[in-house]
């Protein structure tokens, strides 16, 4: 049987309730979701890959049969091919995300010469559409209460 495997890439610095919402809703669509922490040398991350993996693992402990956690360097499309994933899962919060994701979609189509991977977009739930890792990091840096925006496993 061909398993429906999706890669959900991101920095997850830290994982937010927005990420959580997309993953939980996508579990109905896929046999397995690989949460893929991208190592972006252009970005200065607040938390180590090890810490981010721990938080994600703890967040999805009860779903470990359907969720894999990994990290990668390089192109997301290459990682999908390496993992034999036929789907790339992405979340869209707003119009800015849409425009960014549209361009990435077209680039990935050109890079995926064999057209193996299909990109699936889920819109954020209305209640979670304002949450981003960037904003959560800013709240943390400034000593605010970030806990309402992240899973309970994410505590400093």
Image: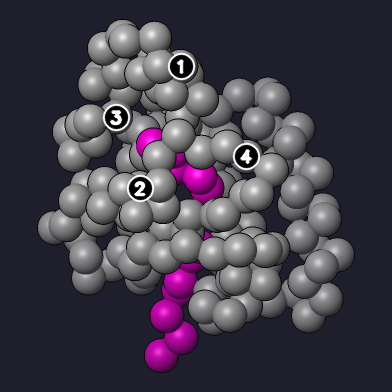
* Residue at image mark 1: 138
Which comes sooner in the sequence, label 1 or label 3? 1
Q: Nearer the viewer, mark 2 or mark 3?
A: 2
Q: Where residue 24 appears, x then y in whole percent?
A: 31, 47
Q: Could you give the CA–CA distance between mark 4 and mark 2, rounded to whole angstroms? A: 15 Å
Residues at discs 1 and 2 in contact (Cβ within 8 Å) = no
Locate residue 29 relative to residue 148 in the image: left or right.
right
* Residue at image mark 3: 150
Question: Element under label 2?
Answer: helix
Task: Kindly indicate the quadrant of the structure image that contains residue 42.
Answer: top right
Which comes sooner in the sequence, label 1 or label 2? 2
Question: Residue 94: within the magenta?
Answer: no
The dot on residue 73 is none
Q: Which residues are magenta?
A: 1-14
* Residue at image mark 2: 52
Question: Which residue appears at 34% of the width and 55% of the height?
Answer: 50
Q: Could you give the CA–CA distance between mark 1 and mark 3, rounded to whole angstroms? A: 13 Å
Task: Kindly indicate the quadrant of the structure image that contains residue 53.
Answer: bottom left
Question: Which residue appears at 24% of the width and 35% of the height?
Answer: 154
Residue 63 visible in the current orientation = yes
Q: Where residue 91 appears, x then y in whole percent?
A: 53, 41
Which comes sooner in the sequence, label 2 or label 3? 2
Q: Residue furthest left?
A: 62
As displayed, is residue 11 above or below residue 68? above
Q: Could you give the CA–CA distance between mark 1 and mark 2, rounded to whole angstroms? A: 17 Å
């Amino acid at each position: 049987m061909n398993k429906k495997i999706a890669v959900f890439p991101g920095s997850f610095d830290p994982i937010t309730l927005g990420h959580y919402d997309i993953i939980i809703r996508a579990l109905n669509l896929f046999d397995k979701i690989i949460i893929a922490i991208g190592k972006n040398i252009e970005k200065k991350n607040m938390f180590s890959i090890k810490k981010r993996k721990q938080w994600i693992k703890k967040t999805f402990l009860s779903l470990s049969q359907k969720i894999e956690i990994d990290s990668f360097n390089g192109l997301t499309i290459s990682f999908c091919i390496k993992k034999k994933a036929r789907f790339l899962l992405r979340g869209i919060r707003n119009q800015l995300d849409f425009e960014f994701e549209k361009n990435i979609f077209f680039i990935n189509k050109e890079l995926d010469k064999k057209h193996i991977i299909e990109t699936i977009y889920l819109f954020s739930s209305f209640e979670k559409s304002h949450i981003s890792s960037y904003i959560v990091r800013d709240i943390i840096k400034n000593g605010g209460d970030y806990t309402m925006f992240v899973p309970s496993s994410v505590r400093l």
